[in-house]
Amino acid sequence: MDSIIELKNVTFEYDDNDIKNTVISNFNLEIERGSFTVILGHNGSGKSTLAKLFNGLNKPSAGEVFVDGISTLDEDNEIEIKRRVGMVFQNPDNQLIASVVEEDVAFGPENLGLRPDVIRQRVDEALKAVEMYEFRTAAPHHLSGGQKQRVAIAGIIAMKPECIVLDEPTAMLDPKGRAEIVSTLHKLNKENGITVVLITHFMEEAEKADRVIVMNDGKIITDDIPKIVFSNVKKLKSVGLDVPQTTELLYSLKNNGFDIKTDVISIEEAADEIYNALHLEEK
Amino acid sequence: MSKVLEIRNLTHTYSGNSTTKRDAVSNITFSVDGGEILGIIGHTGSGKSTLVQHLNGLLKPTKGTVLFEEKDIWLEPKKIRHIRSKVGLVFQYPEYQLFEETVYMDIAYGPKNMGLSGDELRVRVEEICKLLGIDEDYFEKSPFDLSGGEKRRVAIAGVMAMRPKVLILDEPIAGLDPKGRADVIKMIESYNKAYNATVIIISHNMEDMAVLADKLIVMNKGALAMFGKTDEVFLKADLLRQIGLNVPIVTRVMAALKKKGIDVPDNIFTVDDAVKCLCSIKKGGGKDA
Amino acid sequence: MLKDITFGQYYRCNSIIHRLDPRIKILLLIVVFIFIFLAQGFAGLLVMTLFITIIILLTKVPIKLFLKNLKSILPIIIFTTLINLFYSKDGIVLFEIWKLKLTTGGVERAVFLALRIILLIIVGSVLTYTTTPNDLTDAIERLLSPLKFIGLKRFVHVLAMMMTIALRFIPTLIEETEKIMNAQKARGANLEEGNIFERIKALIPILIPLLISSVRHAYELAEAMECRCYNGGEGRVRMKKLRLHISDYLSCVVCLIFSSSVVVFNILI
């Protein structure tokens, strides 16, 4: 596998009043270049810690994390690692630095010391990619949550990263904002070939992913394509995940004696499943 | 049943200079009865938050009146603070308002502002915590050491401890995981039952509204687009879609089934109802064959 | 009460003055300030008044906005005027009450100083009405950049970064303060009544959550900046390059002509 991120026997601990807390231990994971991976887990499952290990914001206590083959412990390459693996956080308000959208997007490329005309071009491209170009001179505090989060994403892709890691980027957004972000990410993955690692506790955001990893207590409990992961609703619910209502319905029907699969999320597919199940019965 | 809260022709306009954006509302009329659960749905920016801040007198209407127990709350502007203990308002992300050293003291802040003290205060706090399942072990903890979900519960308890007759919650479950959500919804239901209190909930989540709310208000661009029993509102799926909202997912699945020729009723809004309905169809189908 | 604070007074329109380079505007503001102080007689001050009137008309900003700014410092103008009215003993005595003598010299001096303050305020308003806060911080950063040659490079960068972040977060923090105030008011907090001690005590429920949230903002912002390859400003360039146009040079010339006439009048009269 051509992997962009590789974790080898990683352990991460932190000190809390001299008590050592181990968040993850002996963790192995590879993220394939160009893939769209979703990491699901409830609050406190260790997924945020994991995300920060990806770009060296957290340094492993033992083991090593490689980005494009470079260890995150390599201090000479600290900036380059952060450029290659960009990161977007939950609260859009705490990620925007400048009070004009385009100047905020320029912040990353400016730090990289690029030529001003190159920066300009990258900022425009990045804003167009997240469909925020028309807001380039707006002030962030006049934008909606979803729009602010898209500006934050533009700020990352203006650095031309290989991979973008998002730590619960939709948790504070309304349904409209959430949908905007997820479709933007799929577009970036398909059209710009950027590897996406989306961390969330909304299962429906994983519907179109290439790979879904479910975390609990700092461990991977499932790692597969969405259909297979979603077919085990019981397991997902047991680790405190949000299950969409379509899945909930199919699961309840199954428990009530329906011969039905639970691995679909969209309304149309769910209706098909139920229709088929009712039809089978008639035969 | 008697009207606890009545809003007549409420209009609020903002004069330009404000740094914080608020959305205007215009000509809103509705009322809620004692013990009812009312849901308010609408997009971000539809005026939901502006509307509810009028109900406890945080905002004064530009035009129109707000009546609490048939009395205009602005009749004596100096006594507006008393209204706030009768109409409790829990803001979005209420955990950000915690400030006291201990959980107990934070929950006691509201009742203390009402003038309670000594045993009366202690009984009040203990009673609400017992009702909501907040264990006494928590009393001496710092609210800042709690988990996100626990903080939210303590903050909501702080408003409930004033024992308001009307409790308003702005997106009370936003940002919580399923466990936290279930806990908060349970709290709201127990409070509603224990004191026969009216509850008003702002939410984006149609699925939760279908289970919780007796009546629904739909806000659109600062105006009241719909007001009626939850079933009645959800039956008007087209109208909801026009303003960019939707009916619960399960209702949409049922509509898709109906299109395929399966005879299901239109008024299915919860998973439980859907399962009941489909099971009976299955049995019926089985008998026919 | 908080929503009355308007941060930055930028008036959006597209005038010659709006389009001037912000660095030039700041420099010319300083020049005009100096010459307003240098003017010793009414003649010089009147020339500056004429100059500033022309600028006001060029900004296309409604006159009433300038008057609004003057109104807010009216007490200071009245205070200095009154003091100076009776301070000077020159000229003919107009009338005398108790120990206070009102002389023509005093009137002249009072009017002169009042006019000077008014002009200073108006010139300042011209800058803030026609330049966005962003352009202002940008210009200050660039004007200070020569300091890096005397080993203050880090200082210049940190100052600029602080101004940028402050500009970005002031609206956020104001909004948050308002939210927390409303939340505590909804829990019965009494912020309007009581004596000074009670009022200060009533602020605690607002200040603590605000402090906690500011720390959170700062912590998360620092991480986000690190993720965007921020390295304390080492090797950082700016996307926007400020370039001087003919109008900028021209405005310098015009300004210097008017200002130097102050010197001429000072010498002649």
Image: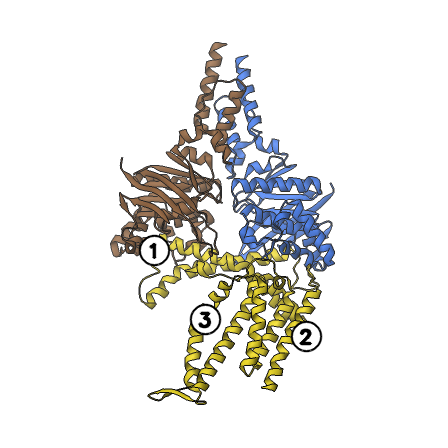
Chain colours: A blue, B brown, C yellow
Tell me how far mark 3 sits from mark 2, CA to CA: 39 Å
Residue B224 falls in which quadrant of the image? top left
Q: Residue at x 33, y 59 (%)?
A: C190
Q: Label 2: few (<14), some or many (≥20) within 10 Å?
A: few
Percent x, y of residue C130:
58, 63
Residue C133 falls in which quadrant of the image? bottom right
Residue under label 3: C73
Which disc, if any, is residue B109? 1
Query: Could you tell me if the residues under marks 3 and 1 are in contact, i.e. CB atoms within 8 Å?
Result: no
Percent x, y of residue C42:
53, 81
Residue under label 2: C151
Report in which chain the residue with disc 1 lies: B
Residues indicated by labels 3 and 1 sit on the same polypeptide chain: no
Q: Label 1: few (<14), some or many (≥20) within 10 Å?
A: many
Tell me how far mark 3 sits from mark 1, CA to CA: 41 Å
| Left-right relation of B34 to B143 | left
Label 2: which secondary element: loop
Q: Name the front one of labels 2 and 1.
A: 2
- Give whichever of discs 3 and 2 has the lower sequence position: 3
Query: In this view of the protein, can residue C93 be seen by the observer?
Result: yes
Q: From what the image shows, is residue C141 above or below residue B200?
A: below
> Is residue B270 or residue A53 the one in the foreground?
B270
Q: Quadrant of the C terminus of chain A?
A: top right
The amino acid type found where label 3 is placed reads Ile
Q: Quadrant of the N terminus of chain A?
A: top right
Q: Name the front one of labels 3 and 2.
A: 3
